[in-house]
Image (tube, rainbow, N blue to C red):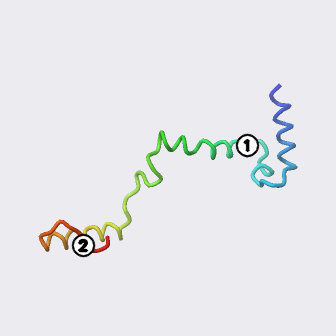
Amino acid sequence: MVIVPLVLLGLLDATHSRHNVLRNYPVIGHLRHFAEFIRPNIQQYFINTNQSGRTYPREIRDLIAATRRRSSDQGSCRVTGPV
């Protein structure tokens, strides 16, 4: 029962000329398109952002530390230049 529709889907995908993924991986390629379709929902519920868990690059940390040192040397907490 299930094999006939999968074979037809595979034959249709193998002759498809617009999407290389579907032509090279006939039935499994649809899983990729489904995963791309539900990706925003998965990220919304399980992953905060694309940057979650990543540290700041060293250049950004050094810039923040230098700005903090300058502001503490001047006795002011306000940053006057671009950060």
In the drawing, does residue 24 fall left or right of residue 59? Answer: right
Residue 70 placement: quadrant: bottom left
Quadrant holding the N terminus: top right
Residue at the farthest top position = 1
Label 2: few (<14), some (14–19) or many (≥20) C-alpha neighbours in 10 Å: few
Q: Secondary structure at mark 1?
A: loop
In the drawing, does residue 1 fall left or right of residue 80? Answer: right
On screen, 14 above or below 65?
above
Q: Amino acid at mark 1?
A: Ile
Disc 2 to disc 1: CB gap under 8 Å: no
Q: Amino acid at mark 2?
A: Thr
On screen, 26 above or below 2?
below
Residue 67, position as x, y percentages in the image: 24, 71
Q: Going 45% across and 50% down the picture, which residue do you hit?
A: 49
Residue 42, position as x, y percentages in the image: 53, 41
Which callout, 2 or 1, points at the residue further toward the start of the chain?
A: 1
On screen, 30 above or below 66?
above
Quadrant holding the C terminus: bottom left
Residue 44, position as x, y percentages in the image: 49, 42
In the drawing, does residue 62 fall left or right of residue 18? Answer: left
Q: Which residue is mark 1?
A: 28
Between the residue at mark 2 and the residue at mark 1, the CA separation in whole angstroms equals: 55 Å
In the drawing, does residue 75 fall left or right of residue 40? Answer: left
Q: Nearer the viewer, mark 2 or mark 1?
A: 2
Q: Going 87% across and 49% down the picture, which residue do you hit?
A: 15
Q: Which mark is residue 49?
A: none
Q: Secondary structure at mark 2?
A: loop
Residue 52, position as x, y percentages in the image: 42, 51
Q: Which residue is mark 2?
A: 80
